[in-house]
Image: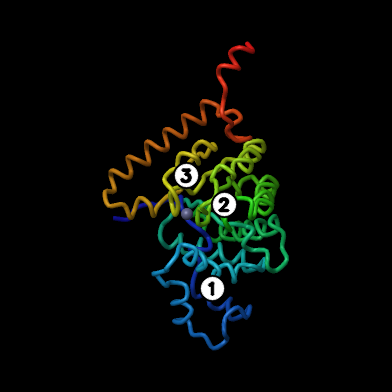
């Protein structure tokens, strides 16, 4: 049966067209000129990694061919062609603009380059509707490590939000720092009216699911924690409870806990003052 498909969790740098990437890698001199396509393929598709950080390092290879304006546009154009072949009608494509600054583009210019490719694809593959989500990144030991770059992503998203750019996300390897330290970024996004999803409980702790929802996420993006659970339905139900708990907490109004950190309350002295 030929099913019409939609794709809501697609990473641009994790879905690039490999023959194009190989040719571009040679053209830009980011791999050894003697490297064969098969060797390039093996670099990209190694499956076992000793650490999650090393797994994330794999994304350096696709990112290396997505630095120039023209290459950024081509990367999404070829993805659209592939999705068209698969019969995908709608896809939300994610990428992190801050990973594409090596050729001197600003984050806003990087996003605009990808949108150029989307417009070209729209003409040639009118059956496929693409929308772009800009990812903030987990990098380094905690949120402070790249807070400046992440805040720039929020600003660049505000400036490009529209028909093609529709939301923010937080992706990367879920570092072990305080997850709630990302809250100011999402506070800014809400101020600007930008919807956002958050990767949570994907490569990190299950408690991140609750915290992501507490930070106001419209959805959490997760796969690994669920897919690798011993009892998948039980894990799915745990996720459901975590999502519901976090959402209720968010809707209740978390007050100063969300923005300034919690402090121990002193109900007795508070009562006496009243
Ligand atoms: Zn993802």
Judge left or right: residue 232 versus residue 188. Answer: left
Q: Secondary structure at mark 1?
A: helix
| Badge nearest the viewer, 3 or 2 | 3
In the foreground, 262 or 273: 273
Cα–Cα gap, marks 1 and 3? 34 Å
**Pointer 2: residues within 10 angstroms few (<14), some, or many (20+)?**
many
- Residue drawn at x 46%, y 64% is 82
Query: Measured from the top left, where is residue 127 in percent x and y?
Result: 48, 54
Q: Secondary structure at mark 2?
A: strand
If you read the primary sequence from the N terminus, does the residue marked by circle 1 or circle 3 appear first?
A: 1
Query: Measured from the top left, where is residue 239 in percent x and y?
Result: 37, 41
Query: Measured from the top left, where is residue 259 in percent x and y?
Result: 62, 35
- In the picture of the structure, the residue carrying the numbered disc 2 is 132
224 lies above or below 194: below
In the foreground, 259 or 106: 259
Query: Measured from the top left, where is residue 108 in percent x and y?
Result: 70, 55
Cα–Cα gap, marks 2 and 1? 20 Å
- Of the numbered discs in the image, which one, if any, rests on residue 208? 3
Q: Secondary structure at mark 3?
A: helix
- In the picture of the structure, the residue carrying the numbered disc 1 is 21
Ligand 1 within 8 Å of disc 3? The answer is no
- Of the numbered discs in the image, which one, if any, rests on residue 85? none
- Residue drawn at x 59%, y 28% is 255
If you read the primary sequence from the N terminus, does the residue marked by circle 2 or circle 1 appear first?
A: 1
């Amino acid at each position: 049966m030929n099913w019409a498909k939609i794709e809501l969790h697609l990473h641009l740098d994790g879905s690039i067209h490999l023959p194009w990437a190989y040719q571009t890698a040679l053209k830009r001199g980011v791999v050894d000129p003697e490297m064969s396509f098969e060797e390039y393929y093996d670099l990209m598709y190694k499956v076992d990694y000793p650490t999650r950080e090393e797994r994330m390092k794999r994304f350096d290879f696709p990112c290396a061919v997505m630095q120039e304006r023209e290459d950024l546009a081509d990367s999404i154009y070829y993805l659209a062609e592939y999705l068209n072949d698969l019969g995908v009608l709608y896809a939300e494509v994610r990428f992190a603009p801050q990973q594409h600054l090596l050729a001197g583009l600003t984050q806003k210019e990087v996003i605009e380059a990808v949108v150029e490719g989307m417009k070209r694809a729209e003409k040639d593959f009118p059956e496929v509707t693409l929308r772009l989500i800009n990812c903030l990144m987990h990098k380094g030991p905690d949120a402070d490590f790249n807070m400046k770059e992440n805040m720039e992503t929020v600003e660049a998203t505000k400036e490009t939000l529209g028909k093609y750019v529709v939301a923010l996300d937080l992706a990367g390897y879920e570092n072990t720092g305080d997850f709630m330290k990302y809250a100011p970024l999402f506070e800014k996004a809400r101020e600007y009216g930008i919807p956002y999803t958050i990767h949570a409980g994907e490569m990190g702790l299950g408690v991140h699911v609750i915290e992501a929802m507490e930070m106001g996420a419209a959805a959490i993006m997760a796969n690994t924690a669920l897919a690798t659970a011993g009892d998948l339905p039980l894990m799915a139900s745990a996720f459901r409870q975590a999502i519901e708990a976090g959402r209720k907490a968010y809707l209740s109004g978390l007050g100063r806990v969300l923005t300034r950190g919690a402090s121990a309350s002193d109900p007795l002295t508070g009562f006496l003052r009243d």
